[in-house]
C-alpha cells in the first residue's frame, strides 16, 4: 500500500462516515469527519509533484483544516452529550 492510496483511503473512509452521520442527522459530528476527509485530501495534494507550484497554499490549508478538526473535536468532547 503506497502513501497516496493510504491518504485517499482514509479520506474515503472519513467521507463515508461523515455522510453516514449526515443521514443520522448529526451535523456536528458529520462536519468533524468531513473536515478530516478534506484535510487528508489536501495533505496528499500538497505532497503531489503535479501540485508543486501550489505547495505552500495547500500546506497552509491543510494545517488550517487540521486545526479546525482539533478544535471541533475538543468542543465535541466537552459539550456533546
Image (spheres, rainbow, N blue to C red):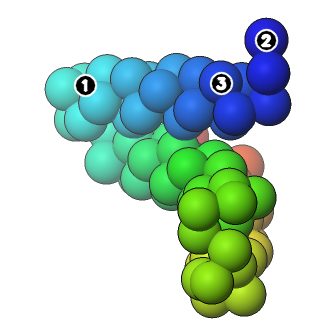
The structure residue drawn at horizontal position 19% and vertical position 26%, both measured from the top left corner, is: 23
Give above or below for 13 relative to 26.
above
User: How far across and down, in percent of the image, does residue 15 sit?
Assistant: 42, 33
Mark 3 to mark 1: distance in Å?
A: 28 Å
Choose between 70 and 35: the one closer to the eye.
35
Residue placed at 59% from the left, 62% from the top? 50
Label 3 with label 2: CB-CB less than 8 Å: yes
Counting residues from the start of the chain, the first of labels 2 and 1 encountered is: 2
Distance of mark 2 from mark 1, alpha carbons? 32 Å
x, y percent for residue 44: 67, 51
Density class for disc 1 (Cα within 10 Å; few <14, some 14-19, many ≥20) is: few
> Residue 32: image x %, image y %?
52, 50
Q: Which quadrant would the C terminus be assigned to in this image?
A: top right
Residue at 29% across, 30% down: 19
Is 42 on the left or on the right of 38, as rendered? right
Q: Which residue is mark 1?
A: 24
Please report whichever mark, 3 or 1, sits nearer to the chain's N-terminal start. 3
Residue 29 or residue 39, whichever sits in front: 39
Q: Nearer the viewer, residue 8 or 13?
A: 8
Is 24 placed left or right of 43 in the picture? left
Q: Which image quarter is the N terminus in?
A: top right
User: Is residue 69 shown above or below 16?
Assistant: below
Residue name at image x 39 percent, y 23 percent: 16
Q: Which mark is residue 1?
A: 2
Residue position marked by numbered label 3 in the rendering? 5
Amino acid at each position: 500500500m503506497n502513501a497516496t492510496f493510504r491518504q485517499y483511503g482514509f479520506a474515503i473512509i472519513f467521507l463515508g462516515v461523515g455522510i453516514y452521520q449526515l443521514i443520522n442527522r448529526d451535523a456536528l459530528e458529520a462536519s468533524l469527519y468531513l473536515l478530516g476527509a478534506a484535510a487528508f485530501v489536501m495533505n496528499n495534494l500538497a505532497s503531489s509533484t503535479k501540485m508543486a507550484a501550489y505547495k505552500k497554499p495547500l500546506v497552509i490549508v491543510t494545517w488550517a483544516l487540521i486545526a479546525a478538526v482539533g478544535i471541533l473535536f475538543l468542543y465535541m468532547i466537552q459539550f456533546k452529550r
